[in-house]
């Protein structure tokens, strides 16, 4: 279940892949014949991986609503990761997060990945809104969100909150006529 953009491949982390990344991240690079990047997986991803793997073991529908690996479209190297913090809550809300490795930043990869993963999320009827948080000083991340149609909704301390609502298609009824 990989997603492809013009320049990227997004691959959801399966249970097997989560276990590999937890036990021996180098095995991931070996399995996919990728050049090793000492900056990936980063500590934040390593920290959530056991929680995600446990959720996935109990509910296969978690796949896709956890972390995804971002690789270049040809699968030659890791660009970063993106994902949600779980399945939609009772209000249809998911929270997105992303990380691009230092060597791949400022190339528009985060914007491209966020756009595609939001489209994927909104293709699920139960998802009504995608939310995100970022540090007040992280201007690049704020630009990614704003350029993807997220609205700034508030601030708590140094953390800014953003949201993007699913567009609801309301076709005009057949009997509607302009100007009447």
Image (spheres, grey):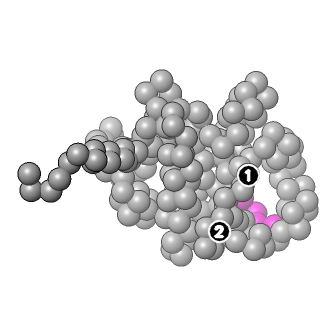
Mark 2 falls on what kind of element? Answer: strand
- The percent position of residue 50, horizontal first and vertical second, equals 74, 34
Main SS class of the magenta portion in the image: loop
- The percent position of residue 29, horizontal first and vertical second, equals 85, 62
In the image, is residue 180 part of the stretch drawn in magenta? no
Q: Which residue is the site of mark 1?
A: 1
Residue nearest the observer in this picture, 21 or 109 = 109
Q: In the image, is residue 39 above or below residue 95?
A: below
Visible in this render: residue 62?
yes
- The CA span between labels 1 and 2 is 14 Å
Count of labels shown? 2
Q: How many residues crowd mark 1 within 10 Å: few (<14), some (14–19), many (20+)?
A: few
Q: How many residues crowd mark 2 within 10 Å: few (<14), some (14–19), many (20+)?
A: many
In the image, is residue 39 part of the stretch drawn in magenta? yes
Locate residue 80: give its quadrant: bottom right
Q: Which mark is residue 8?
A: 2
């Amino acid at each position: 279940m990989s997603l492809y953009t013009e320049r990227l491949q997004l691959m959801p982390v399966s249970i097997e892949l989560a276990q590999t990344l937890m036990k021996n991240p180098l095995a991931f690079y070996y399995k996919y014949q990728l050049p090793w990047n000492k900056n990936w997986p980063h500590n934040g991803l390593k920290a959530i991986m056991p929680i995600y793997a446990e959720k996935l073991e109990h509910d296969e529908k978690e796949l896709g609503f956890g972390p995804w690996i971002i690789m270049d479209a040809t699968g030659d190297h890791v660009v970063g990761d993106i994902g949600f913090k779980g399945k939609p809550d009772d209000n249809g809300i998911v929270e997105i997060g992303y990380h691009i490795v230092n060597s791949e930043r400022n190339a528009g990869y985060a914007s491209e990945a966020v756009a595609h993963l939001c489209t994927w999320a909104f293709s699920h009827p139960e998802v009504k809104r995608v939310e995100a948080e970022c540090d007040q000083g992280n201007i690049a991340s704020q630009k990614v969100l704003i350029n993807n149609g997220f609205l700034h909704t508030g601030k708590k301390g140094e953390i800014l909150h953003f949201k993007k609502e699913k567009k609801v298609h309301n076709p005009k009824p057949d009997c509607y006529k302009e100007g009447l």
